[in-house]
Image (cartoon, helix red, strand yellow):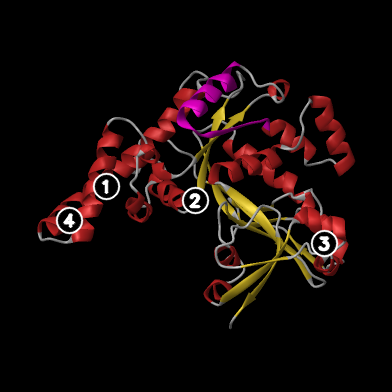
Amino acid sequence: MGFKCGIVGLPNVGKSTLFNALTQTASAQAANYPFCTIEPNIGEVSIPDPRLYKLSDLVESKSTIPARMTFVDIAGLVKGASKGEGLGNQFLANIREMDAVAYVLRCFDDDDITHVSGEIDPVADSEIVETELMLADLESLEKRRPTLEKKAKSGDIDSKALLELVEQIISLLNDGNPARQVTLKKDQQDLYSSLQLLTAKPVLFVCNVDESSAATGNNHSASVNKLAEKEGAGVVIISAGIEAEISQLDEDEKMEYLAELGLPSPGLNRLIFEGYQLLDLMTYFTAGPKETRAWTIPNGSTAPRASRAIHTDFEKGFIRAEVISYDDYLVTGGEQKAKESGKMRVEGKDYIVKDGDVIYFRFNT
């Protein structure tokens, strides 16, 4: 499991430029961080995690497989997308498949690039995107409501429960609030997920700034930061221009250039980190002579749930997990020495996997 992040935005905000820059950066990261293009607007990047390669070197694996993230450059949004304007229907369908949505917001001034609204206002841009998604959700729910009302009146318990939630969200949307702000009861989570609402997706604001603002941000990105705090959303400041430049450099040149700019890491790395934080994800590893691999799972996953990332049969036939922490694995010098020093733990179905755990699963076939 990795995660899919849809990149959306208005025309001329740098959305496609950013997508191209990020994927070019990934392709230039050599074998450690490979990139492949599945379709013209879909890019898969490997998630940079130095721990994976340290483990692989230690056990001398023949193959090293990182976890992956998928970027999807979704068709440009225009006002009226919820009513089918532009590529509206295709645009909305693509978003439904995403785990999270990155709103690319123009946070740079350039008289040579016309803004569709005539002025640079990233907060207003985000409101246009959000409004179109809310209108689409509202239309979807209002279409479902009559059928649910009919079934609820006939005594269908499931329909009654879903109708209650639908009406709650419709009220929220009518007040100009996205579905993700709904307060759910414990027994409503599965119902909520089944609605596949666009504004239920976690949001990450991506501020596309000029090169001089890449390290510190600017007044435009500051206004987005305030919005992100209010919304409980993630935010990343990236210069698409810088990302395009570093894609042409080798690793040493890249790090030197980033240091000169006061940037700790490439934008791709920061975007992935914020995505993980937003979706509350973590990584565990499997390691051996044949293969060392990183696996992405939700934080708080039990050992059986974590094993599902490898194969559903692992979860169904789960017996136990043999666990070594990442630090213990390195310090002791590998699995066998970790066993001998008492650093391997045998864990059952209730064990909550920790970030960086190195795990071997035992299961019935």
Q: Which residues are magenta?
A: 219-239
Binning the other alpha carbons within 10 Å of mark 1 as few (below 14), some (14 to 19) or many (20 upward) gives many
Q: Which mark is residue 96?
A: none
- Decide: is 288 above or below 73: below
Labels 1 and 2: the sequence-earlier one: 2
- Residue identifier under label 2: 98
- The amino acid type of the residue labelled 4 equals Thr
Say which label, 1 or 4, has the lower sequence index.
Answer: 4
Q: Amino acid at mark 2?
A: Met
x and y percentages locating residue 14 in the rendered image: 59, 33
Residue depth check, mark 1 versus mark 4: number of the one nearer the observer: 1
Disc assigned to residue 56: 3
Question: Which callout, 2 or 3, points to the residue nearer the camera?
Answer: 3
Q: Which mark is residue 165?
A: 1
Element carrying mark 2 = loop
Secondary structure predominantly adopted by residues drawn in magenta = helix
